[in-house]
Amino acid sequence: MDKEKVIVIDFGGQYNQLVARRVRECNVYCEIYSYRTGIEEIKAMAPKGIILTGGPNSCYEEDSPTYSKELFELGIPVLGLCYGAQLMMHVLGGKVITPEVGEYGKTEINFTDNSVLQKDLPKKSICWMSHFDRIAEAAPGFEVTASTADCPIAAAQNVSKNLYAIQFHPEVLHTENGTKMIYNFVREVCGCAGTWRMDSFVKESIEEIRNKVGDGKVLLALSGGVDSSVAAGLLSRAIGKQLTCVFVDHGLLRKDEGDEVESVFGPEGQFDLNFIRVNAQERYYSKLAGVTEPEAKRKIIGEEFIRVFEEEAKKIGAVDFLAQGTIYPDVVESGLGGESAVIKSHHNVGGLPDFVDFKEIIEPLRNLFKDEVRKAGLELGIPERLVFRQPFPGPGLGIRIIGEVTAEKVRIVQDADFIYREEVDNAAAEYKKEHGEDPSWMPNQYFAALTNMRSVGVMGDFRTYDYAVALRAVKTIDFMTAESAEIPYAVLNKVMNRIINEVKGVNRVFYDLTSKPPGTIEFE
């Protein structure tokens, strides 16, 4: 796809995906690369701008991540954030030190009148600081454009060379006007036109798929989640009945979800495609028997997906391509993009067996973030109830059950999860009916998980020794950082009562307050 591009060079920062997302919010395409990416490769990309991320190191130490001075001499605008700003100063002749006091959290910042990034923005605002080192001397040719009480050089610029360094993090929501600062960089400084939109993405992707597939046949792993559903819609729009969607009911879905998926994508649904449902519950339970380690479960589930697809491909004849609903955070979190450590493996990224009985893999959503996937889904005419469905992990309830997966445990978590989601939805609907808007506590994702803890309880006149269910609910914009949702106690209490009374095998209910980081949104 021929498009203007800004690249993010990752130095191990925790916010690398956020930076890319903020750029895309400015309708400019953006990708993440490791600092190990060579200068010639970067030149070949011909980016309109370059952004350097934060990182945990001190840039002046010998073994710290760095980049050659040539990067700043290409004539391409460069924006350094936190560690990226310090590195820019260090490489270009400035001085970075470790002071006695660092800066962490929300901090008031003062900008000068000539700050390019602060164009049309207040000269005083709140920013998010997260650094111990700081810039003590700006590099030659740079003017200081911002300061805080403890950081005399909070931003600096060399306008003639299009180099900009800021010590704070404009990509996080805690920084006032942070997205507008990034807008000023990518749209004003870099001169990007802002042509990256979902309507153009859908149109161009359909043409790309048609050209690539030709008269070939495509097999898609359809889970019924947002990602695979949008992938199915996109492929169906491009190649119609050349697409076969295999829906594997592995017994690890939410309650009644298998039938719901079939009603949308099956013969009675709205899509022009071939639909096959494979009921493989017992096969999965057998493979997962005795397995407790999270990564092992993910690998087993992922491999079984592929095995089932291979078997179905042989039944239907020649299949040229395997399609997957991989999205950009899957790629980055699996360690295949940027510099950040592997957070978790994804069943559809890098977890494929050595032998796959298909010519090639197609991943039409590989470059999209979750919110962009939803926009593409709406653009394709997929029903809103499907597009805005809660995210569901590829390995399904396999990673919402701590320890060994069994049919009995699946039954418990399905029933508990159904009750939880039903009561939260009912409470939210009641609030909206009364106030005309969604409640402020409404989570972006909420589910029940089954712990491996069993404890003594008393129900009626009998002693029990049953499982504890954990309820999880988070508020998030990007699913890369999240905070626990403050669901009203009355709602949680009602959920607890229903689960204890209606779900056999449970005698305790916990509420998970953990944010991301340090936790993940899912349990395993």
Image (cartoon, rainbow, N blue to C red):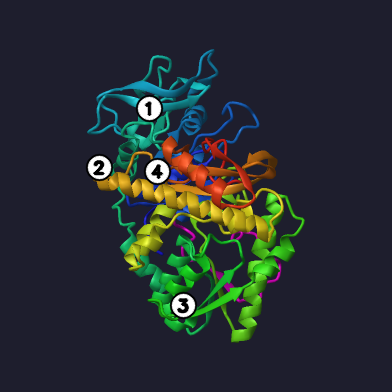
State left or right for residue 201 relative to residue 492: left
Q: What residue sits right under mark 1 in the picture? A: 127
Estimate the spatial distance between the alpha carbons at disc 4 and disc 2, rounded to whole Å: 54 Å
Question: Is residue 345 visible in this depiction of the protein?
Answer: no
Q: Which label is found at residue 75?
A: 4
Q: Which residues are magenta?
A: 345-369
| First-in-chain label (3 vs 4) | 4
Which residue is identified by label 3? 266
Residue 483 or 171: which is nearer the viewer?
483
- Identify the image quadrant of the N terminus: bottom left
Mark 3: which secondary structure?
A: loop
Disc 2 versus disc 3: distance between alpha carbons? Answer: 38 Å
Q: Earlier in the sequence, mark 4 or mark 2?
A: 4
Tell which tag, 1 or 4, sits nearer the viewer. Answer: 1
Is residue 11 shown in magenta?
no
Residue 412: percent from left, percent from top: 61, 54
User: In the current view of this chain or complex, which residue is farthest to the right?
Assistant: 290
Q: CA distance from mark 3 to mark 1?
A: 50 Å
